[in-house]
């Protein structure tokens, strides 16, 4: 464990064109976190790779996916059970998009198709007043842009979970499940270039759904606050589980 304290549970796989340009999803997260990929254990959960035993001395990030939580795919339900076990022992978890919805589902919440359809592009995230009491959010601006692409939503939070931010489209953009567990509906690992290629990839579908892909592309914004949130969560979690003289702990 000592050389790979960070686990990425990869639950999706980008198309060839996006992967050839930007790399695979774990590299997006490692660049955002500023954590070496070679010091990260990547588990391709969607591909049937076995999950490691939950470990309170490690940190896990659960990625986005092109699957749907409501399909209850076997690998997804296995990951949900893993999340429940990890939460029981206080392991640090950060879920993104599908990972956000999967955490809510695993812990007793509900996930459904969003009644208003897809949320996509750069959208404004609004912190709730309660976010001022959260150590990771208290220094962020009350409103900031984020990159989004999703069709399902957390329709009901698990008992004890707290929504800390929303957008005009989705009331659960940041959720806190406990002192060591958080998730975001938006994608803190996206750069504007990744977000743009995601839009281009779905050009025909977005047009059919009534979106203007060119307008979405023109309105894309950098989203440094979202990346800062992810990096801060992981670095603070690593600083708790690594020796204080470890170089990774020092970087937190």
Image (spheres, rainbow, N blue to C red):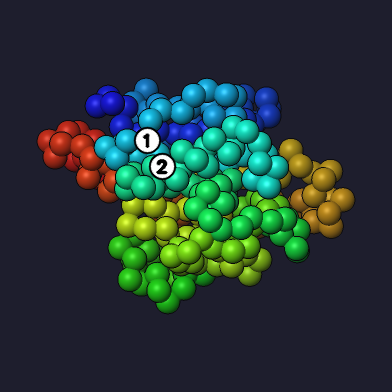
What residue is shown at x 84% (from left), y 50% (from top)? 207
Residue 197 location, quadrant: top right
What residue is shown at x 59% (from left), y 32% (from top)? 75
Question: Could you say where residue 202 lies in the image, as x and y percent from the top left?
Answer: 76, 42
What residue is shown at x 37% (from left), y 23% (from top)? 38
Location of the N terminus by quadrant is: top left
* Vertical arrangement, residue 210 with respect to residue 32, above or below: below
Q: Which residue is mark 1?
A: 54
Q: Which residue is mark 2?
A: 85
Horizontal placement of 48 versus 199: left or right?
Answer: left
Residue 167 visible in this rendered orientation of the protein: no
* Vertical arrangement, residue 131 with respect to residue 75, above or below: below
Does the residue at mark 2 contact the one at mark 1 (Cβ under 8 Å)?
yes
Q: What kind of element bears circle 2?
A: helix
Question: Could you say where residue 160 lies in the image, as x and y percent from the top left?
Answer: 43, 65
Q: What kind of element bears circle 1?
A: loop
């Amino acid at each position: 464990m000592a050389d790979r304290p960070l686990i990425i549970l990869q639950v999706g796989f980008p198309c060839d064109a996006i992967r050839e340009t930007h790399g695979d999803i774990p590299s997006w997260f490692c660049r955002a976190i500023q954590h070496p990929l070679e010091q990260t254990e990547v588990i391709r959960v969607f591909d049937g790779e076995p999950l490691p035993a939950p470990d309170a001395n490690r940190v896990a990030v659960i990625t986005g996916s092109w699957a749907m939580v409501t399909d209850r795919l076997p690998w997804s339900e296995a990951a949900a059970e893993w999340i429940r076990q990890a939460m029981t022992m206080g392991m640090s978890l950060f879920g993104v998009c599908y990972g956000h919805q999967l955490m809510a589902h695993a812990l007793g919440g509900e996930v459904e198709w969003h009644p208003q359809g897809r949320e996509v592009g750069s959208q404004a995230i609004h912190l709730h007043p309660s976010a001022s009491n959260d150590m990771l959010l208290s220094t962020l601006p009350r409103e900031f842009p984020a990159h989004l692409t999703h069709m399902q939503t957390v329709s009901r939070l698990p008992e004890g979970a707290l929504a800390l931010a929303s957008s005009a489209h989705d009331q659960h953009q940041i959720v806190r499940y406990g002192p060591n567990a958080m998730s975001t509906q938006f994608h803190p690992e996206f750069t504007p270039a990744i977000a743009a290629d995601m839009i281009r990839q779905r050009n025909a579908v977005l047009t059919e759904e009534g979106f203007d892909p060119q307008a979405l592309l023109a309105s894309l914004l950098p989203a440094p606050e979202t990346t800062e949130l992810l990096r801060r969560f992981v670095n603070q979690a690593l600083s708790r589980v690594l020796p204080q003289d470890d170089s990774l702990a020092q970087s937190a």
